[in-house]
Image (cartoon, grey):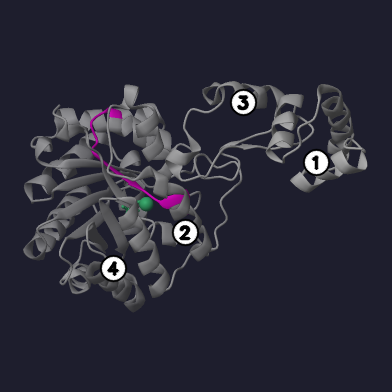
Amino acid sequence: MSDAGQRVTIFDTTLRDGEQSPGASMNLGQKLQVARALRDLGVDVIEAGFAAASPGDLEAIQAVGRQVEGPIVASLSRCNKGDIEASWKALADAPRRRCHVFLATSPIHRDFKLKLAKDEIIKRSVDGVKLAREKFDDVEFSAEDSARTELEFLAEVVERVIEAGVGTVNIPDTVGYALPSTYAETIRYLRKHVRGIEKAVISVHCHNDLGMAVANSLAGVLEGARQVECTINGIGERAGNASLEEIVMAFKTRHDVLGVTTGVQTERLFPTSRLVSQVTGLHVQRNKAIVGQNAFAHEAGIHQHGMLTNRETYEIMRPEEVGFARSQLVLGKHSGRHALKDRLLALGYQLDEAQIDKVFADFKVLADKKKDIYDADIEALVVHGQILG
Ligand code: KIV
Ligand code: ZN
């Protein structure tokens, strides 16, 4: 594959699937603020909402399309005239726009939600794509619940929507049911059996119900998918979507295996994560990969000693690469003498070895009683322990 083939399109759906997280609704101003941050981050596509869902969603997509220049702005639509017209109304003024149409293909959705037979699913998908193509040059089709769809039928749907003119075909694991091996098998099957597959970009869209959204997305990319749909902080329906920051840093850190790149300015990841957390009110767990407060914090003495000698002993990425100011050596009961000595020096205390031994002994007693040891506590140990006379 050429170099261009190694570039993965980052399709951010924080403002659409992410906003579907219970409690994550954003107002117009907040959506614009997040959209600008996503542009600065360097994502390729911003899915700004689902125009037919509400007048507010339509207005927000319209505002993002008009005011946030650079990325393609997408609006989600079901395969019907009303939805596609709503997306057109929202995006008619956007310089770069995409209509994202979807229809479920799995047996459970066909039989219980849609009550449609296979041939009706194909007809409705093709008609939806053709309708969208009358207005939009750039159309994406998603076969909702692809991961639970019979492979042969999925391949037939994909082939038909490509014939109808889609540029991107998305294979969602809507309920986070896939495993990396089964999801890889789905993408491999489509690449092998769908006539004309090379005319469309294959996209992955994975939910996190079994905690495998990122692993499944990477498995899809290894099989040739070249668009990844993801959200900041992994927010989204139920357990969320694949997390953008984890995907992008996996590509960067394990380029040796994954072999693909993105246009994301990774040092914007942490500020963007903070912004999304603030506007949605959805807290980022402390130990969240890449952007959690503990992602670059080390407490164990052995780790701290390693870090002070060579940070690569315990860090596979540099904190600055993702927008953190620095790694943190947190002082607690697991910390060792090296880290304490380092902190004393940083606080301006040049102590001899015997003095450090004394502070270290007092520090261990304090750390057994107190969860967080602050700089003020260290200073108090030095002063009250009469280390400096
Ligand atoms: O999870 C899903 O299937 C979706 C589609 C609408 C793309 O979000
Ligand atoms: Zn989704």
Q: Marks 2 and 3: which is nearer the front?
A: 3
Label 2 vs label 3: CA separation? 33 Å
- How far, Cα to Cα, is label 3 from label 4? 46 Å
Q: Amino acid at mark 1?
A: Ile
SS under mark 2: helix
Answer left or right for 202 relative to 270. left
Disc 4 on helix, strand or loop? helix
Most foreground residue, 39 or 246? 39
Residue 308 tag number: 3
Q: Amino acid at mark 4?
A: Val
Characterize the local packing of mark 1: few (<14), some (14-19) or many (20 or more) Cα atoms within 10 angstroms. Answer: many
Q: Mark 4 Cα within 10 Å, few/some/many (few <14, many 20+)?
A: many
Q: CA distance from mark 2 to mark 1?
A: 35 Å
Quarter holding the C terminus is top right
Q: Which residue is mark 1?
A: 378
Residue interval drawn in magenta: 222-237
Please state the horizontal and vertical placement of residue 135, each as a whole percent of the image: 9, 66
Closer to the chain start, of discs 2 and 1, is 2
Please name the residue that numbered disc 4 is placed on.
Answer: 64
Give the spatial CA distance, label 4 vs label 1. 50 Å
Q: Split into 4 quadrants, where in the image is the N terminus?
A: top left
Q: Secondary structure at mark 3?
A: helix
Residue depth check, mark 2 versus mark 1: number of the one nearer the observer: 1
The disc, 1 or 3, on the residue closer to the chain's N-terminal end is 3
Q: Position of residue 101 (x, y in %)?
A: 22, 57
Q: Amino acid at mark 3?
A: Leu
Name above or below for residue 233 compared with residue 89: above
Query: Residue drawn at (42%, 69%), measured in percent from left and top?
Result: 30
Q: In the image, which disc is placed on residue 276?
A: 2
